[in-house]
Amino acid sequence: MPEQITLYTAKICPWAHRAEIALAEAKIPFKRFEIDLKNKPEWYAPKVNPASKVPAISYGGPDVDPATPSPESQKIAESGILIELFADLSKEELLPKDPIARARARFFAETVTSAAVGPWYSAVTRGEDPAPFLKALDIVQSLLPAEGFAVGQWSIADAAVTPFFARAEATFKNDIGKYEVGKGKALWATVESDPKYARFRKYFEDVKSRDSFKTTFDSDVVIKSFSALHGRPSA
Ligand SMILES: N[C@@H](CCC(=O)N[C@@H](CS)C(=O)NCC(=O)O)C(=O)O
């Protein structure tokens, strides 16, 4: 019997979404427990994650109700660590075997995440100009091979970055955020039509067409939550 895994997660959260995509690709059974980030259970920080963030897992120990985590299970947090763990636990190949390809996958995950998150998040939450987000797409395109995923075969590098592009699309396309009205829609129209971003578009279609994305992303929840938190949409 494999050890039990309970994932503490939240639909809105891109970091938690990384873990959900990786678990789906890993084909590892797990229990999913939604944490309401606006009203977190009082037991969550003391019993699961002292940082009080999602994602986190309980691993092993008795098979208990997720709302009463056992002290006998291991508690592990941080999305980057969790997706590596799921790759290690899986019978599927979620990272290539070759050490150089593994290093390239990790480099892609780190570099693309740090290029994309800041421009997207500061546009949506602080009203900065969304335009610098396009620089992240230049970086993605400079790192992608001619075809396929971050390192050719699908890997946890793709799980690491897809949640941010999915939320960037959901917010910019619907003009959700504190930036000047119309700038999100205009930016996403460029992403969708400019020949310069053709390689990114193909990559984004490829990751979105996988079951691991389709079964884990709820665009309605993301659109509603981000509009409630950060304003508009303009419609
Ligand atoms: N570095 C963490 C970031 C996780 C994170 O920031 N999660 C947010 C939600 S997206 C959270 O749980 N924040 C706590 C809160 O909202 O109270 C990771 O990669 O797992």
Image (tube, rainbow, N blue to C red):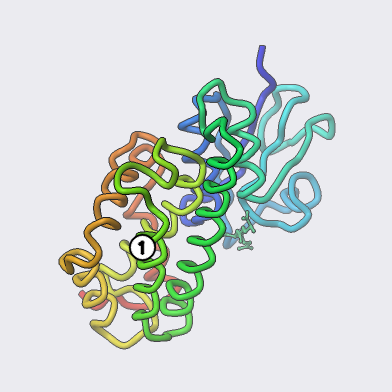
Furthest residue toward right: 71
Which quarter of the figure has residue 189? bottom left
Q: Is residue 33 left or right of residue 165?
A: right
Quadrant of the image where one finds ligand 1:
bottom right
**Left or right side of 104 for 57:** right
Q: In which quadrant will I find the N terminus?
A: top right
Q: Residue at x 49, y 56 (%)?
A: 14
Q: Which one is in front, 56 or 119?
A: 119
Q: Looking at numbered disc 1 in the image, what kind of residue is underneath it?
A: Lys
Left or right placement of residue 161 versus residue 52 in this view: left
In this view, the residue in front, 70 or 166, is 166
Looking at the picture, how far across and down is residue 102, in whole percent?
A: 57, 41
Q: Residue at x 57, y 46 (%)?
A: 9
Q: Is residue 38 above or below residue 134?
A: above
SS class of the residue under badge 1? helix
Q: In the rendered view, would you say 126 is above or below 100?
A: below
Relative depth, front residue between 35 and 142: 142
Above or below, 142 relative to 96: below
The residue that disc 1 covers is 224
Percent from the top left, x then y, of residue 197?
25, 64
Q: Nearer the viewer, residue 135 or 234?
A: 135
* Residue beneath the point at 41% across and 35% down: 153
Tally the numbered discs: 1
x and y, in percent, of residue 155 in the image: 48, 39
Residue labelled 1 has its Cβ within 8 Å of some atom of ligand 1: no
Q: Residue at x 51, y 24 (%)?
A: 92
Quarter of the rendering occupied by the C terminus:
bottom left
